[in-house]
Image: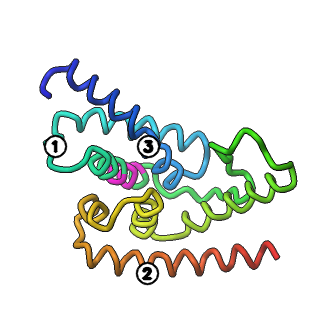
């Protein structure tokens, strides 16, 4: 994969097949739309840089997750923690075109925004694990991305889910 055209071709194919990973990771690590766009650009750049290092020993999606999660953590460290919270101002992307009605959509948007706020309140490690699991990765694949053992992934995910449930319990109580 040493030549530029090969890198560009692989990068384009990866984005076509796994571009949703960039969106999910940027949404999980950046609160504001401008920050998400900046992070998404950084993630795509890091994926492009990583193409020549891809040895093919892991699935492309696993490799892309590893690059994206590590890059998001670095981006977050380098830009500092953002204390601006917008519980009601988070844009919801990818909703179905046929909406069931404005009241139901407003409730859905509010709940989704609050869920992302609960995710943002978790430790970065927990957030990473939950994001990987929500995207359907098996414990083996999560272990490969994070460098943990499969057993440790199971234990860590169980604890992360408990922490998220505690965060969401507070969110759901606010809605009542």
**Lateral position of residue 97 relative to residue 3, left or right:** right
**Vertical side of 92 occupied by 132: above or below:** below
Indicate whether 163 appears above or below 20. below
What residue does disc 1 label? Answer: 56
Mark 2 vs mark 3, CA separation in Å:
25 Å
**Residue beneath label 3, please?**
22
From this view, report whether residue 103 is shown above or below residue 98.
Answer: below
The quadrant in which residue 41 appears is top left
Between disc 2 and disc 3, whose residue precedes? 3
Q: Residue 5 at x, y = what percent?
A: 22, 18
Q: Quadrant of residue 150?
A: bottom left
State the separation of the CA atoms marked 1 and 2. Answer: 32 Å
- For image coordinates 28% across by 63% down, the residue present is 146
| Labels 1, 2: front one | 1
Residue 76 magenta: no
> Can you tell which mark lies on residue 159?
2
Which residue: 64% across, 43% down? Answer: 93
Q: Which residues are magenta?
A: 69-75
Find residue 140 and report its horizontal and vertical position in percent. Answer: 26, 65
Return the x and y of residue 58 as percentages of the image width and height.
Answer: 20, 50
Q: Is residue 102 left or right of residue 42?
A: right
Which sits earlier in the primary sequence, circle 3 or circle 1? 3
Task: In the rendered view, tell whether residue 11 sits above or below residue 43.
Answer: above
Q: Earlier in the sequence, mark 1 or mark 2?
A: 1
The residue positioned 61% from the left and 47% from the top of the image is 32
| 10 relative to 72 in the view: left or right | left
Q: Residues within 10 Å of mark 1 (few under 14, many from 20)?
A: few
Q: Main secondary structure of the magenta part?
A: helix
Give the x, y percent position of residue 82: 55, 56
Mark 3 and mark 1: Cα distance apart in space: 20 Å
């Amino acid at each position: 994969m040493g030549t530029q055209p090969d890198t560009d071709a692989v990068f384009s194919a990866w984005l076509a097949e796994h571009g949703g990973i960039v969106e999910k990771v940027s949404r999980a690590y950046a609160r504001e739309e401008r920050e998400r766009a900046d992070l998404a650009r950084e993630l795509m750049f890091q994926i492009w840089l990583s193409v020549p290092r891809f040895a093919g020993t892991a699935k492309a999606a696993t490799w892309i997750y590893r690059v994206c999660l590590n890059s998001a953590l670095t981006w977050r460290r380098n830009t500092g923690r953002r204390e601006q919270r917008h519980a009601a101002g988070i844009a919801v992307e990818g909703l179905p075109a046929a909406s069931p009605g404005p009241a139901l959509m407003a409730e859905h948007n509010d709940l989704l925004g609050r869920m992302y706020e609960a995710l943002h309140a978790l430790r970065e490690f927990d957030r990473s694990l939950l994001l990987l699991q929500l995207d359907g990765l098996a414990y083996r694949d999560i272990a490969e991305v994070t460098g943990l053992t499969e057993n440790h992934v199971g234990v860590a995910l169980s604890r992360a889910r408990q922490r998220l449930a505690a965060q969401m319990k507070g969110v759901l109580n606010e809605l009542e």
